[in-house]
Image: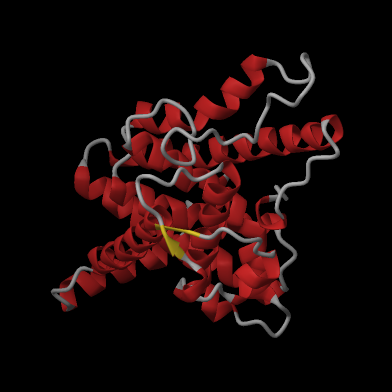
């Protein structure tokens, strides 16, 4: 579990050292490092959401092009009269997620000598997109995963023969994570740091170099310490419990990811003639 990986009370663990460093920083510097972190993550989050909602792209975009960076001139401004399709919304979701991930300082510090940063962004993009989409749905009072404006997270299911998918299974995928966020009443600040923990923890699913994995683990410890401090600051009495509750969201993301992976495999077998755009093809 993630909590086992980032919380350790041994005197020499990175988590404890980071907590001590935060205490020292707060004493010696009036600028709170956690607030600085949240301001930076909030600005990045708002930019990603703004681009996602305001623009669309009506042509095919390969995963390689998205990883390099889609040029701004390729975007068209969306208006209320233009109803985006599932593919268009999903494409913009992935483009903005990839752009967000690529520009994170820790991802840029990975370097690409062994293609670590490229492999990392490609490997983490769907897990982060699941959490970001769920939080967007939760913020807009949706009780289920929706890409935007009520667009389902699943492609057109009308072409699938009856009986291929159990409706209860599909509803579980749609609702499990959003329900968890709603039950915990996750705040924006909690989501921002929690999403960084999820991103870092995803290194275990990606073929990174040893140095890349070690670097991401150290980053996860740092963000774990920041989340713990945020919880303690908001509620000193129940902060440790809140910290554990929030980390449990990452496991629900992983469960949702695995369910979507199962859906994608069955979908491709059920309707092999339907080919998703490469960028939004689940992997």
Residue placed at 48% from the left, 75% from the top?
73
Spot occupied by residue 204 in the image (x, y as percentages of width and height): 68, 56
Q: Is residue 133 above or below residue 73?
A: above
Task: Work out which quarter of the rendered image holds the N terminus and state it.
Answer: top right
Of 78 and 38, nearer the camera is 78
Spot occupied by residue 217 in the image (x, y as percentages of width and height): 57, 64
Residue placed at 64% from the left, 66% from the top?
120
Of 55 and 207, nearer the camera is 55
Of 139 and 202, nearer the camera is 139
The residue furthest left is: 30
The residue furthest bottom is: 113
Residue placed at 30% from the left, 65% from the top?
43
Residue placed at 48% from the left, 55% from the top?
197
User: Is residue 12 at least partly visible in the picture?
Assistant: no
Instruction: Determine whether, in the image, residue 56 is placed left or right of residue 120.
Output: left
Number of on-image labels: 0
Instruction: Determine whether, in the image, residue 8 is placed left or right of residue 39.
Output: right
Q: Is residue 19 above or below residue 265?
A: below
Q: Quadrant of residue 254?
A: top right
User: Is residue 45 at least partly visible in the picture?
Assistant: yes
Q: Is residue 10 above or below residue 176?
A: below
Spot occupied by residue 59 in the image (x, y as percentages of width and height): 62, 61
| Picture colour scheme | secondary structure
């Amino acid at each position: 579990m993630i909590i086992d990986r980032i919380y350790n009370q041994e005197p020499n663990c990175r988590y404890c050292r980071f907590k001590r460093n935060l205490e020292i920083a707060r004493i010696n510097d009036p600028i709170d490092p956690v607030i600085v972190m949240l301001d930076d993550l909030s600005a990045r989050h708002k930019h990603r959401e703004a681009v996602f909602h305001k623009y669309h792209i009506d042509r095919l975009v390969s995963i390689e092009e998205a990883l390099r960076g889609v040029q701004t001139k390729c975007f068209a401004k969306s208006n209320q009269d233009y109803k985006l399709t599932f593919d268009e919304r999903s494409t913009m979701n992935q483009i903005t997620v990839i752009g967000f991930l690529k520009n994170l300082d820790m991802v840029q510090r990975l370097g690409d000598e062994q293609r670590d940063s490229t492999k990392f962004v490609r490997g983490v993009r769907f897990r982060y997109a699941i959490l970001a989409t769920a939080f967007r749905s939760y913020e807009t009072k949706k009780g289920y995963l929706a890409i935007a404006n009520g667009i389902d997270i699943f492609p057109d299911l009308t072409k699938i023969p009856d009986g291929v998918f159990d409706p209860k299974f599909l509803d579980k995928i749609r609702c499990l994570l959003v329900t968890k966020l709603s039950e915990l009443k996750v705040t924006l600040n909690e989501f921002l740091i929690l999403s960084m923990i999820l991103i870092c923890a995803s290194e275990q699913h990606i073929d990174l170099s040893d140095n890349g994995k070690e670097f991401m683990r150290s980053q996860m410890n740092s963000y774990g310490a920041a989340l713990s401090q945020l919880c303690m600051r908001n509620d000193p009495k129940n902060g440790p419990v809140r910290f554990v509750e929030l980390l449990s969201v990452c496991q629900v993301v992983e469960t949702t990811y695995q369910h979507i992976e199962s859906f994608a495999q069955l979908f491709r077998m059920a309707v092999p003639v339907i080919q998703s755009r490469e960028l939004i093809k689940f992997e």
